[in-house]
Image: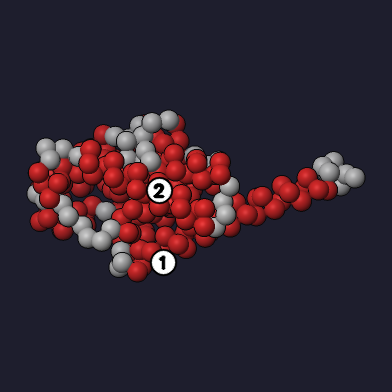
């Protein structure tokens, strides 16, 4: 039996249910991230995540729900650290770009969000796509991994610079933080994203008094 738009009623019901469930997944993940970072006292992080979602939508207005979930949850690993030890960053010539730091952050984040999505009964393909995106959100790869990376960088310069200038310089060094700022800008793939981030990036270097 067909309804008024020519789609079988059963199929139409499945489509609507799937759309509703997908929307619910994003809202559940957003609340999970907010609760997690509220618990560890990181309100600044929450703002960064929400604005990363915003910039994903600006860069790709038709972004799918998996990409939006990846944006809100890309730094989930930070919410489950027992403590923050920057000794490996201080020792590494790459600083915040050290392979040890980035690989653990990306891979552990993908694992954690994958486990949560399983708990809320997200689909296997959906979970796989989110994990794929989060696992490369620092270094990029395919078009959507690059887009997530770009949105992360824009939100970083919009929201996180003062934190790095006021706190991370003391925990590492001014040189390591400057290198972080330069890397976060230079890793941006799209010209549109670079144009958005550039004023904040240039201001970040001034704040370091270089």
Distance from disc 1 to disc 2, alpha carbons, whole Å, reads 18 Å
- Is the Cβ of the residue at disc 1 closer than 8 Å to that at disc 2? no
The image's mark for residue 88 is: none
Quadrant where the C terminus lies?
A: top left
In this rendering, would 7 be left or right of 178? right
In this rendering, would 17 be left or right of 124? right
The image's mark for residue 35 is: 1
Color encoding of the figure: secondary structure
- The percent coordinates of residue 139 (x first, y second) are 32, 36
**From where the camera sits, is residue 56 visible?**
no
Counting residues from the start of the chain, the first of labels 1 and 2 encountered is: 1
Quadrant where the N terminus lies?
A: top right
Residue located at (38% from left, 64% from top): 36
Of the residues tagged 1 and 2, which is closer to the observer? Answer: 2
**Identity of the residue furthest to the right in this view:** 1
Choose between 189 and 2: the one closer to the eye: 2
- The percent coordinates of residue 198 (x first, y second) are 28, 40
For residue 186, what is the image quadrant? top left
For numbered disc 1, what is the local secondary structure? helix
- The percent coordinates of residue 95 (x first, y second) are 15, 42
**From where the camera sits, is residue 46 visible?**
yes
In this rendering, would 144 be left or right of 41? right
Read off the residue under disc 2: 111
For numbered disc 2, what is the local secondary structure? helix
Residue located at (15% from left, 46% from top): 89
Q: Residues within 10 Å of mark 2 (few under 14, many from 20)?
A: some
For residue 39, what is the image quadrant? bottom left
In this rendering, would 97 be left or right of 117? left
């Amino acid at each position: 039996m067909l309804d008024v738009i020519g789609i079988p009623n059963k199929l139409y019901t499945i489509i609507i249910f799937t759309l509703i469930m997908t929307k619910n997944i994003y809202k559940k993940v957003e609340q999970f991230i907010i609760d997690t970072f509220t618990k560890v006292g990181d309100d600044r992080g929450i703002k960064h995540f929400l604005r990363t979602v915003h910039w994903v939508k600006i860069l790709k207005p038709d972004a799918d729900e998996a990409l939006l979930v990846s944006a809100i949850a890309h730094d989930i690993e930070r919410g489950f650290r027992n403590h923050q030890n920057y000794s490996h960053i201080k020792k590494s010539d790459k600083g915040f770009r050290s392979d040890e730091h980035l690989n653990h952050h990306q891979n552990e984040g993908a694992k954690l969000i994958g486990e949560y999505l399983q708990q809320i009964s997200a689909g296997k393909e959906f979970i796989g796509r989110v994990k794929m995106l989060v696992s490369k959100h620092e270094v990029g790869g395919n078009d959507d991994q690059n887009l997530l990376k770009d949105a992360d960088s824009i939100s970083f310069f919009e929201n996180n610079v003062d934190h790095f200038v006021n706190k991370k310089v003391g925990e590492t060094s001014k040189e390591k933080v400057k290198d972080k700022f330069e890397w976060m800008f230079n890793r941006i793939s799209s010209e549109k994203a670079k144009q958005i981030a550039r004023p904040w990036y240039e201001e970040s270097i001034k704040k370091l008094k270089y």
